[in-house]
Image: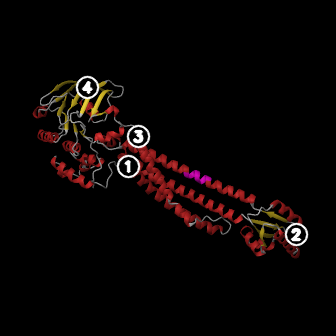
C-alpha cells in the first residue's frame, strides 16, 4: 500500500496517455533510420573492400566475333598485365561467369545470343604505386578494344551515396531525439501545471526538488520504456519483413538489406536511449520549474 | 541552534501580494523556543498571511525574518527543505492530497524525509488511531467529513515531531470536545519541546488554554497579551 504508489497521480494524466504513442512512433522511425544507416555502412565497407586492389580489363568483341582472335587478344592482355610491376594476378572470366553476372539485368535468353565482351579480373598490390593511366594507354595500344577500369569513379560515387544515407539517418535520429525531448518537456510541464497544488504541499512539508523530480523522471522513464519497446518491436518486425521481401524479389539484383548479428544487437540501444532522454528531460524540466518557487 | 535564540523572530516585517497593498505592516515579535501562543484577530486581519511567512510559502516585502536562527533573506534555497521539515503546518483548507489515503497523506512528511515504509506505517497508524481515524486509514480525503479531514491534516503536521507547529484554525471543523483533545495534543507536543502557534477564532478554547496571544488587526500586530510567558 505504501511503497506501490507515487505521491503524484501522474499515471492518470492525459499527457501520460498520448506520450507513449508518440514515443513508440519515434522509436519505430529511429530504429528504421538506424538500420538504414547500418546497412549503408556495411554496403560501403563491402564495396570498398571488394574493389580496392582490383582492376577490370574489358575487351570489346570484334565485328566478326572471331573466337580465335578474341582468345588471342585476351592472352596478349594477360601477358602484358603479368609483366607489369605491381600486378599480382590477372585472370579472364569464363563466358559462363560473365553470362551469370549479366543475367539479372538481361535475362538468360539474351545473354546466350549476345556477343559478350571479355572480362579480365586483375589483382594489384595495394602498396605498389601503379600508374593506372599509363597502364590503360599501354593496354589500349597493345590490345585493340581493351579498356581498363579501376572502379574509382564508380566507387567514389557509391561511397559518397552511402555516406549521404548515413548522414541523413544520423540527422533523422537527431531530430527524433529532439522530438522526444520536446514531447517530454511539454508533457512534464502539463503535469506540473495539473499537479501544482500537490507539488506545493509536498514542497511546504519539506520535499526537495530532487524528490519531486524523481517522481516525474521515474514516470517518464516508465512511459518511454513502454512506448519505446512497442515501437522497437514493430520496427524489428518491419525490418524482418523488408529483408524477406528483398531476398524474395531481388535475388542478386538488389543490394542485401540484411543486418549482421552485431547490428541487430545495436538496435535495442534506441528505446533505452530514448527512455534515458525522456527521463533526463523530465528531471531537468521539473528542477528548473521548481527553482522558480519560493 | 542556541537555546536562547527564538525559534521565530520578525523585525519590521511587511508583506504584500504582488503589487497590492501591504497586508502585514511592521510586524515585530519573536517566539521563544518551547513557547505556546495563540494568534488571534478578526477575519482578514492577516493571520494566514503571517503564517505563510512563517512556513516559508511567501517572502516578505521588507523586514527581517529569522527561523531557527537562520536569516531567511540570507538562506540558500537548497537549505529550505531542511528548515521546512522542522515546521509542522495545519493549513486552514487542510491541503490534503486527494488521491492518497489518510495513511499516505500523514506519511508524506516522513517519506520526504527518507523514512522507511516499515517504520512509517506503524507510527502513522498509531497517530491516526489517536485522532479517532483508526477505521479510516485507507480512506481518501474526498470520502472523509470535514472534521475527519482536519484530523488527518493535524496528524500530518505533527507526525514527525516538528520543532515549530503552526496551525491555522485547527479546530474550525471539529466539535468542542475534539477541539479540546487536539489542543491537548498540541500541548503535549509543546511539553516535548515543540514551539506552537495556533491561529484561532475560538475564544472559548483560547481562554480555556490560557496561552499568550499575538493579536492582529488590519495587518498590524496590535496587542501582545502575555499570560504565562512574555513575548519579546
Read off the residue under disc 2: A62
Identify the residue at horizontal 42%, vertical 53% (top origin).
A221
Q: Do the residues at pointers 4 and 1 share their chain?
A: no
Vertical placement of residue B215 versus B126, above or below: above
Sequence-wise, the earlier of marks 1 and 2 is 2
Chain containing mark 2: A
> Which class describes the residues within 10 Å of circle 4: few (<14), some (14-19), or many (20+)?
many
Chain containing mark 3: A
- Quarter containing the N terminus of chain B: top left
Nearer mark to the viewer, of 1 and 2 = 1
Region of the chain picked out in magenta, as a range: A167-173
Percent x, y for residue A190? 41, 43
Read off the residue under disc 4: B27
Identify the residue at horizontal 75%, vertical 61% (top origin).
A151
Read off the residue under disc 3: A289
Q: Identify the element where label 4 is drawn.
A: strand
Q: Identify the element where label 3 is drawn.
A: helix
Between B188 and B206, the residue placed more toward the observer is: B188
- Can residue A172 be found in the magenta stretch? yes
> Which class describes the residues within 10 Å of circle 1: few (<14), some (14-19), or many (20+)?
some
Chain containing mark 1: A
Amino acid at each position: 500500500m505504501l511503497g506501490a504508489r507515487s505521491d503524484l497521480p501522474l499515471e492518470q494524466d492525459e499527457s501520460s496517455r498520448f506520450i507513449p504513442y508518440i514515443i513508440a512512433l519515434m522509436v519505430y522511425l529511429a530504429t528504421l533510420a538506424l538500420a538504414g544507416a547500418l546497412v549503408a555502412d556495411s554496403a560501403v565497407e563491402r564495396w570498398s573492400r571488394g574493389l580496392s586492389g582490383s582492376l577490370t580489363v574489358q575487351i570489346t568483341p570484334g565485328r566478326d566475333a572471331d573466337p580465335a582472335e578474341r582468345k588471342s587478344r585476351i592472352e596478349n592482355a594477360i601477358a602484358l598485365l603479368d609483366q607489369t610491376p605491381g600486378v599480382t594476378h590477372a585472370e579472364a572470366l569464363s563466358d559462363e561467369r560473365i553470362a551469370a553476372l549479366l543475367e539479372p539485368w538481361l535475362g538468360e535468353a539474351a545473354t546466350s545470343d549476345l556477343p559478350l565482351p571479355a572480362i579480365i579480373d586483375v589483382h594489384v598490390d595495394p602498396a605498389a604505386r601503379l600508374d593506372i593511366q599509363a597502364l590503360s594507354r599501354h593496354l589500349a595500344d597493345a590490345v585493340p578494344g581493351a579498356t581498363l577500369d579501376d572502379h574509382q569513379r564508380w566507387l567514389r560515387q557509391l561511397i559518397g551515396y552511402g555516406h549521404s544515407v548515413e548522414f541523413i539517418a544520423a540527422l533523422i535520429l537527431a531530430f527524433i531525439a529532439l522530438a522526444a525531448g520536446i514531447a517530454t518537456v511539454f508533457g512534464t510541464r502539463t503535469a506540473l501545471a495539473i499537479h501544482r497544488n500537490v507539488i506545493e504541499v509536498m514542497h511546504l512539508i519539506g520535499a526537495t526538488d530532487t524528490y519531486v523530480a524523481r517522481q516525474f523522471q521515474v514516470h517518464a522513464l516508465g512511459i518511454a520504456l513502454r512506448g519505446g519497446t512497442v515501437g522497437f518491436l514493430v520496427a524489428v518486425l518491419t525490418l524482418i519483413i523488408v529483408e524477406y521481401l528483398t531476398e524474395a524479389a531481388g535475388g542478386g539484383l538488389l543490394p542485401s538489406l540484411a543486418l549482421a548479428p552485431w547490428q541487430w544487437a545495436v538496435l535495442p540501444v534506441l528505446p533505452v536511449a530514448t527512455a534515458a532522454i525522456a527521463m533526463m528531460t523530465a528531471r531537468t524540466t521539473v528542477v528548473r520549474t521548481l527553482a522558480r518557487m519560493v | 541552534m542556541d537555546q536562547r535564540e527564538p525559534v521565530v523572530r520578525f523585525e519590521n516585517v511587511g508583506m504584500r501580494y504582488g503589487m497590492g497593498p501591504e497586508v502585514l505592516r511592521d510586524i515585530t515579535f519573536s517566539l521563544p523556543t518551547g513557547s505556546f501562543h495563540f494568534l488571534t484577530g478578526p477575519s482578514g486581519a492577516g493571520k494566514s498571511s503571517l503564517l505563510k511567512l512563517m512556513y516559508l510559502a511567501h517572502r516578505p516585502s521588507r523586514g527581517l525574518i529569522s527561523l531557527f536562527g537562520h536569516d531567511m533573506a540570507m538562506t540558500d534555497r537548497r537549505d529550505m527543505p531542511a528548515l521546512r521539515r522542522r515546521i509542522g503546518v495545519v493549513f486552514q483548507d487542510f491541503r490534503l492530497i486527494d488521491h492518497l489515503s489518510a495513511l499516505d497523506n500523514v506519511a508524506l512528511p516522513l517519506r520526504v524525509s527518507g523514512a522507511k515504509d516499515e517504520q512509517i506505517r506503524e507510527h502513522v497508524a498509531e497517530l491516526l488511531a489517536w485522532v479517532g481515524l483508526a477505521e479510516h486509514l485507507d480512506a481518501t480525503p474526498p470520502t472523509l467529513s470535514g472534521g475527519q479531514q482536519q484530523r488527518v491534516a493535524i496528524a500530518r503536521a505533527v507526525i514527525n515531531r516538528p520543532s515549530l507547529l503552526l496551525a491555522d484554525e485547527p479546530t474550525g471543523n471539529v466539535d468542542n470536545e475534539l477541539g479540546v483533545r487536539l489542543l491537548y495534543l498540541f500541548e503535549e507536543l509543546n511539553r516535548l519541546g515543540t514551539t506552537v502557534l495556533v491561529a484561532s477564532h475560538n475564544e472559548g478554547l483560547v481562554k480555556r488554554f490560557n496561552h499568550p496571544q499575538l493579536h492582529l488587526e488590519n495587518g498590524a500586530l496590535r496587542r501582545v497579551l502575555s499570560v504565562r510567558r512574555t513575548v519579546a
